Amino acid sequence: MNGHNDMNIDEAYQSLGMAVCEVAVDDYKKALKYNQTSTIRTLEKFFLSGWFVLLCSGIVEGETVIEEVRGSWEREKTLRRF
């Protein structure tokens, strides 16, 4: 190792995969906020793909991400009306 980090290569790849998933979730939130339908569809397809499962190491299911982020966005929209 380089002395900067005790992370092994598998942990590094897992960390990178999780970072990709986190960015996708952030992008999904923004796409919902600005009603970017094409981006929403693309990200939902990604969340439901085997690629997402691989990158997230099966820690979270794509359907759960979609449901929770959409639910959170719907609650936020409701609160903004008041």
Image: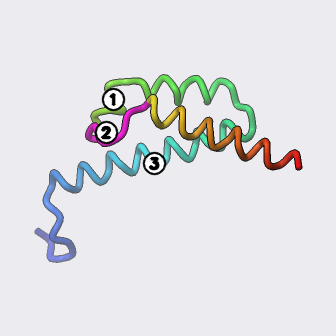
Describe the element under mark 1 as helix, strand or loop.
Answer: helix
> In the rendered structure, which amino acid carries the disc numbered 2?
Leu
Main secondary structure along the magenta-highlighted residues: loop
Q: Residues within 10 Å of mark 2 (few under 14, many from 20)?
A: some
In space, the residues marked 2 and 3 are separated at their CA atoms by 10 Å
Q: Is residue 59 a member of the stretch shown in magenta?
A: yes
Q: Please give the name of the residue rendered at 73% of the width and 47% of the height, measured from the top-left corner.
A: 76
Q: Please give the name of the residue rendered at 41% of the width and 45% of the height, measured from the top-left corner.
A: 20
| Nearer the observer, 75 or 29 | 75
Q: Percent from the top left, x then y, of residue 11?
A: 19, 55
Describe the element under mark 2 as helix, strand or loop.
Answer: helix
Q: Percent from the top left, x then y, of residue 24?
A: 50, 41
Answer whether labels 1 and 3 touch (C-beta < 8 Å): no
Q: Please give the name of the residue rendered at 39% of the width and 51% of the height, measured from the top-left corner.
A: 19
First along the sequence among labels 1 and 3: 3
Tag shown at residue 51: 1
